Amino acid sequence: MSSTDDDLEQQFSALFGDDVQPLRGKGANHIAKPAELTPGVLARRKAAEEENDPESNFLDAVSSIAQVDPYEFLEFVRPGVQHGVYRNLRMGKYEIHSQLDLHRHTVEQARIALFQFVDECQKHGVRCALVTHGKGAGLAQPARLKSCVNHWLRQFDQVLAFHTAQKQHGGTGSTYVLIKKNNAARQKTTETLDQARRLKG
């Protein structure tokens, strides 16, 4: 150790005491990789903010939600969605770009998380998402979160369709969600189609 190092060591000890040691080698240079900001991560982050502003959440309170059976298949499709598109969603043929797991959420926490999740999915161009709500079979209030998700997803203009997932994605405890393209994605599709027409012409 050089005299310069000795001086630095003494200065450090004077500031922090002998019990605290400066980091050396790899420990001092390690920088943790930041977590990927997926729509699921962003939804959880914004859920905390949403609790302070509940008025912006338009989803119905649980008191107005009809109960579904724990093993019931959920299905919903808006007019105008092509039959083939909905069939592919039902069969789990679309790549799942984002997931939201509502296990261990209270109803109100789930309401906030789903509200933020769908919004973030559309902003980030996610077309197919998976919401895991569980079946709730055997509970005092069975399928409570499942019933809420079934009701709430219909309230989003951004949601074009949803259907109970295939077994490999959670079966009746999960739901595929087809989300409307955002403006940027629609513009890109239009440009792609225009380019294809020009090439054919």
Image (spheres, rainbow, N blue to C red):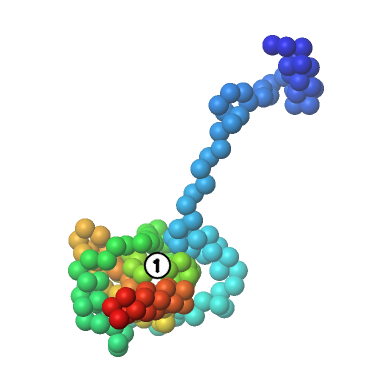
**Percent of width and height locating residue 114:** 43, 69
Q: Quadrant of residue 117?
A: bottom left
Q: Nearer the viewer, residue 193 or 150?
A: 193
Q: Could you tell whether 66 is left or right of 62 in the image? A: left
**Percent of width and height locating residue 37:** 49, 56
Q: Quadrant of residue 92?
A: bottom left
Q: Could you tell whether 171 is left or right of 144 in the image? A: left
Label 1, on which residue? 126
- Taking the spot 30% from the left edge, 69% from the top edge, the residue there is 176
Q: Is residue 38 above or below residue 125?
A: above
* Residue 42 visible in the picture: yes
**Percent of width and height locating residue 36:** 47, 52
**Percent of width and height locating residue 153:** 37, 76
Q: Residue furthest bottom?
A: 79
The type of residue carrying mark 1 is: Val
- Taking the spot 77% from the left edge, 16% from the top edge, the residue there is 4
Q: Quadrant of the N terminus?
A: top right
- Taking the spot 39% from the left edge, 67% from the top edge, the residue there is 126
- Taking the spot 73% from the left edge, 11% from the top edge, the residue there is 2
Q: Nearer the viewer, residue 31 or 103?
A: 31
Q: Is residue 96 above or below residue 159?
A: above
Q: Could you tell whether 114 is left or right of 178 in the image? A: right
Q: Nearer the viewer, residue 32 or 165?
A: 32
Q: Quadrant of the C terminus?
A: bottom left
Mark 1 is surrounded, within 10 Å at the Cα level, by few (under 14), some (14 to 19) or many (20 or more) other residues, namely many
